Image: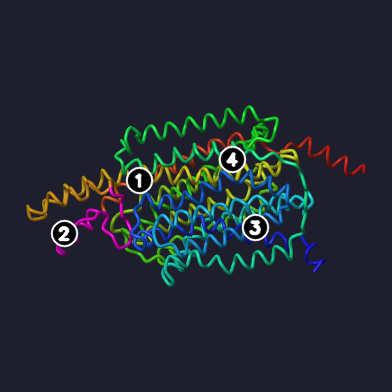
Amino acid sequence: MTSIRNHPMAALGVLVLGLFMTLLDLTIVNIAIPSILDGLHASLDEVLWVLNAYSLLYAVLLISSARLGDIYGPRKLFAAGVVIFTIASGFSALAQDPTQLIVSRGLQGLGAAVLAPQGLPLMMSLFPVEKRGGVFAIYGVIAGLAVIAGPTVGGFLVTHFGWRSIFTVNLPIGIITVALAMLLIPDLRPGRRHRLDLAGVALATAGLLGVIYGLIEGQRYDWGVVSGFVTIPEIIAAGVVLLAVFLYYQARRQGSEPLLPFAVFKDRNFTLMTFVMAAMGFAILGLYLPLTIYMQSVLGLSAIDAGLTIALQPLAMIVSSGVASGLVQKVNGKYLLIPGLLALAAGSGYIDWAAHADSGRWDFAPGLILSGLGMGCIWTPVFSIATRDLPAQLAGVASGVINTIQELGGVLASAVVGAFLQNRLALALHDQAVAASGRLPEQYRGPFVDGFSNAGRSGFEVGAGQAGANLQLPAQVEAIARYVFTHAFVDAMHPTLLLPIAVLVVAAAACLFVRGPRRVAVMAEEEREAVA
């Protein structure tokens, strides 16, 4: 047992398994959205909270849990995080209404936040400097594969076992991961003293919650009064003010372990890579949220058919990841990142262009393949570029910061893309309903148009078995209602997908400023080693 426990690759395998489980859960829920909408009679804004409850807690607690790992030992925190995540998965599977599922997903996010940041300090201790580049590449590829394999795995589970199975599948994996962690991961105990910035956590959480609540719930309240004198713009403004207070508070605490250490941002490459990771978090969720609803609710595909269609993307990513892994040590990483980001943007643009109410599932193949090839060129170099020039003492903090910012990108995507999609859908439903109402008997025209026009105020129901509005209409009118919903959703989806595409293009432009390896420093280090 001792020899196994001292084998770094065995420990890496367990860490990767935990990482894969938590990251898979970020996107596996997307493919199940239409089924959750139907099964729990949830609205689109409630499902956005299902996504954000996980990501929000994950993001704001990541850095604090990294410091707890320094205090109590990363193995202990890793195992505790897996236990919390597994129990929360069980609660999610048992949820009987949207509120219960939202709370359970928040608990999942807590577990993921506890376990995720323990990997980097363990890898730094287990692997020598010359092997860390390859280890980071493995970590990055597995992370990317987990994020984009979710729709395929989720599609299979939802179609054959129902949406609850995407959570129950975590139970045996979690139990196995905890057992392997205690068996294979060495019990390193740095025992460092830390001051936990609980006030910083509270300010960041409250600020983000205000902004996200306002964006997600804005359409339901027609961007006006929520209750009494409280309005959606005031809630968003209060969130922004709290975030500004958070940044000011962090600036005052830079000498005493702040939640957000500004020192890591002095390294240009690290700062640029945090932006790239935020862009990737934004782009992936911003693409999958409309696309998975579209494939099932508009095209009528089953979850497994939608998942298998999207599977072209991870397959293409595996191919390009292999090529990128061979090049990452030979060329400046930006020469992989820039074409990768642009290919992902171009592939997403093709998907947007090919989306119509009557499209075939394979019409998207070129865009999915191109975007997958681009992803493989992004995940592989991004972590090594980010940490290459950082001092060793900042490595753990840097890991927490970069993962936090990636998650915030996803949170922002579900809020911004969700808000924009709901807004465009409200307008498109009204316009399509007015255009189609002429095909109805006159006594049905008014209720038909009003039903679609007011759909947003009760929450958009866009599940696979729903028509997009709560209408009481005769059976012969349902075909026209279905026509209105499908064409309106496509009309709303086209401009919505431009948001993640634009973010990717900006990220590609930012990568032009990535600094290459410091050759002088590298040569000096080699000379010192030769003398020694």
Mark 3 and mark 4 residues within 8 Å of each other at the beta carbon: no
Residue 526 belongs to the span the image colors magenta: no
Task: Identify which amino acid the numbered label 3 is placed on.
Answer: Ala
Q: Residue at x 76, y 53 (%)?
A: 131
Q: Which of marks 4 and 2 is in front?
A: 2
**Residue bearing mark 2:** 473
Q: Rounded to the nearest whole Å, what is the CA distance between mark 3 and mark 4? A: 27 Å
User: Between residues 424 and 257, which one lies in front from this camera angle?
Assistant: 257
Q: What element carries label 2?
A: loop
Q: Mark 3 or mark 1, which has the lower sequence index? A: 3
**Residue bearing mark 4:** 274
Outermost residue toward the front in this view? 228
Looking at the rendered structure, which numbered label has been put on residue 80?
3
Q: Is residue 16 above or below residue 202?
A: below
Image quarter of the C terminus: top right
**Residue bearing mark 1:** 421
Q: Rounded to the nearest whole Å, what is the CA distance between mark 3 and mark 2? A: 52 Å
Q: Mark 1 or mark 4, which has the lower sequence index? A: 4
Per the rendered image, the range of residues in magenta is 458-486
Q: What element carries label 3?
A: helix
Q: Mark 1 or mark 2, which has the lower sequence index? A: 1
User: Between residues 273 and 518, which one lies in front from this camera angle?
Assistant: 273
Task: Identify which amino acid the numbered label 2 is placed on.
Answer: Leu
Q: What element carries label 1?
A: helix
